[in-house]
Image (cartoon, helix red, strand yellow):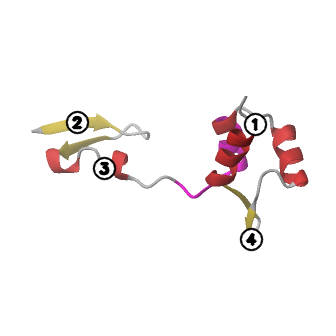
């Protein structure tokens, strides 16, 4: 069976059964950038930077990129559950 799927760029592609579900097999990212962390948590940008400054959220600097480990975001949410 062949499925036609529209990609983000609007280009149609064809996937056979063996290729379906490839996205489901993608590993979860280890880190995310600031905008993704904001979307994932619902925390505002300023608050996120405050949490980074206070050490409540860890960061990884690689060159100019500021990356936030997803585990650090999970730990923040778990610590603040009520």
Q: Give 61 or 16, whichever is nearer the viewer.
A: 61
Residue on which disc 1 sits:
80
Label for residue 63? 4
Within-10-Å neighbours for mark 4: few <14, some 14–19, many 20+: few
Residue at point 53%, 55% (across, down): 29
Q: Kindly check if marks 2 and 1 are in contact, taking CB atoms under 8 A apart as contact.
A: no
Identify the magenta region: 29-39
Q: Gap between marks 2 and 4, in whole Å? A: 40 Å
* Left or right: residue 57 compared with residue 27: right
Q: Quadrant of the C terminus?
A: top right
* Image coordinates for residue 6, horizontal then vertical, percent: 33, 35
Q: Is label 2 in contact with label 4 (beta carbons under 8 Å)? A: no
Q: Give the residue at mark 3.
A: 22
Dot 2 or dot 4, earlier in sequence = 2
Query: Which of disc 3 and disc 1 is earlier in sequence?
Result: 3
- Element at badge 4? loop
Instruction: Report the mark closest to the observer, 2 or 3.
Output: 3
Spatial CA distance of label 2 from label 1 is: 44 Å
Residue under circle 2? 4
Q: CA distance from mark 3 to mark 4?
A: 31 Å
Percent across and percent down for residue 36 are 65, 43
- Disc 3 versus disc 4: nearer the observer: 3
């Amino acid at each position: 069976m062949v499925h036609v799927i529209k990609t983000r760029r609007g280009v149609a592609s064809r996937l056979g059964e063996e290729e379906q579900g490839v996205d489901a097999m993608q590993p979860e990212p280890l880190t995310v950038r600031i905008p993704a962390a904001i979307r994932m948590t619902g925390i505002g940008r300023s608050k996120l930077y405050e949490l980074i400054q206070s050490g409540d959220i860890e960061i990884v600097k690689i060159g100019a990129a500021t990356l936030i480990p997803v585990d650090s975001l999970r730990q923040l949410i778990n610590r603040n559950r009520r």
